[in-house]
Image (cartoon, rainbow, N blue to C red):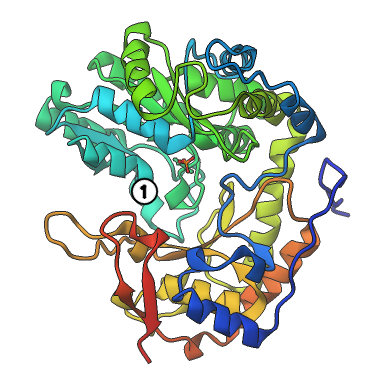
Amino acid sequence: MTRSWAEPWKIKMVEPLTMTTRTEREEAIRAAHYNTFLLKSDDVYIDLLTDSGTSAMSDRQWSAMMLGDESYAGARSFYKLVDAVHDIYGYEELIPTHQGRGAEHLLSQILIKPGDVVPGNMYFTTTRFHQERAGGKFVDVIIDEAHDPKSMHPFKGNIDLAKLAAVVDEVGSERVAYVSFETNVNLAGGQPASMANIKAVYAYCESVDILVMLDATRALENAYFIQQREAGYEDRSIASILRQIADHSHGATVSSKKDNLVNIGGFLALRDPDLAREARALLVAFEGLHTYGGMAGRDMEALAEGIREMVATDDHARSRVGQVEYLGDKLIKYGVPVVKPIGGHGVFLDAAAILPHIPLDEFPAQALAAAIYVDSGVRGMERGNVSAGRDPVTGKNRHPKLELVRLTIPRRVYTQSHMDVVAESVIEVYEQAETITGLRFTYEPESLRFFQAEFESVS
Ligand SMILES: *Cc1c(COP(=O)(O)O)cnc(C)c1O
């Protein structure tokens, strides 16, 4: 008999949810211009828009907040955070920021000169935005399997070393600002890189004198997959694997709104004190003084506790990813096209396969996310043509190979019964997919357009 698992926490406080009727939801999605980002959360039943900043904090994190030292300079809470990052990730230099993109901004400004190339595994929206804004050219060097939603490769987040070496050979290592190595690649569906690949990339970069900067936002989930899938790591703790990932880098940007179990915060971590000094000089202009960056003292307390808590036992990571797999397996069993293997933070529906009758320029994933909301009040988001934006040279929609709807699971927030409700809704929408029609822009923002774009139905 297979034995069930359950969440390794119990509920101490509840937040009531709003239930709406189908008619109310049809009205709400029209008012939100078919963009789930523009819905009011009061009109949402189960919110799977993002796992960013939506985690439930523990009783220990809440009590730590009461200890926040709100001194402008040199706050005790800052030094607790420095210790936590050093103990768990091993980085010596900590630059606190308001969230991940604040760290990406600083890193891009100190390392990228106009005309530089930044190779990375797939891309992340805000990361690439800051790299391009600093004058860099992002080049995708992820393995081909990452772009194939049916490939069962266990490490679809891997960097293709041949592609990376080709970039370096073409432009010369002095024009490569750094390698932007994302752990558990978000836009590939939450897919990990293997330790073998992380080590190989680092060794290669050392040999050609190029820095490796991790996007370690999801390094915990990546560490969990290494433990589950890579030979030699099955008996290692997730904490020790996470540390080994960080050991193979020269620094990292982290959005603490994900793995780190807080609602706001982030950091840039570095090893080189001179680089850290450059970053701190910008920090005071863009974020805040170097001992708080963009965070209050209480935020840093909750973050320091969250960083320790996420690796205190392996149970947290196992149940976090286990809940995602639980939802994914239900959909797979029913034959709904999803990105496989199921990733670390969400289930990614293959909208191009579910809605083959909607052309890419009519945004099938955007339309599918709206249809699921109308069916059940479950809010997901588009990750495809709208998110990818336009090519700055040609001005055309980028047409990424993946046209997905992301159902992202917040940490420690929903139970398995919520996952059952979500699965049933997705299955019902899938069965009536041919009734869904495409969308066109009525307002298209110039950058990061998915956040604020407005649409109307083409029918
Ligand atoms: C969320 C995220 C970011 C950006 O972080 P913010 O805190 O939202 O600014 C960067 N990289 C990855 C992989 C992310 O998931």
Residue annotated with mark 1: 125
Q: Residue at x 19, y 36 (%)?
A: 136
Label 1 CA crowd tier, 10 Å (few <14, some 14–19, many 20+): some
Tell me if residue 250 comes above or below residue 201 in the rendering.
Answer: above
Q: Where does the C terminus fall, quadrant-wise? A: bottom left
**Viewer-proximal residue, 28 or 71?**
71
Q: Residue at x 38, y 72 (%)?
A: 454
Query: Does residue 258 appear anywhere in the picture?
Result: yes
Tell me if residue 372 comes above or below residue 158 in the rendering.
Answer: below
Tell me if residue 107 comes above or below residue 366 in the rendering.
Answer: above
Number of labels in the image equals 1
**Viewer-proximal residue, 429 or 191?**
429
Taking the image as shown, residue 232 lies to the left or right of residue 398, namely right
**Helix, strand or loop under label 1:** helix
Taking the image as shown, residue 341 lies to the left or right of residue 198, namely right
Query: Does residue 430 appear anywhere in the picture?
Result: no
Place of residue 191 in the rendered image (x, y in percent of width and height, measured from the top left): 50, 46
Place of residue 457 in the rendered image (x, y in percent of width and height, measured from the top left): 39, 85
Snapshot quadrant of residue 113? top left
Taking the image as shown, residue 211 lies to the left or right of residue 265, namely left
Q: Residue at x 26, y 28 (%)?
A: 109
Q: Residue at x 80, y 63 (%)?
A: 417
CB at disc 1 and ligand 1 closer than 8 Å: yes
Outermost residue toward the top? 273
**Viewer-proximal residue, 16 or 234?**
16
Q: Where does the N terminus fall, quadrant-wise? A: bottom right
Place of residue 246 in the rendered image (x, y in percent of width and height, measured from the top left): 49, 21
Tell me which amino acid carries mark 1: Thr
Snapshot quadrant of residue 251? top left
Place of residue 131 in the rendered image (x, y in percent of width and height, measured from the top left): 27, 37
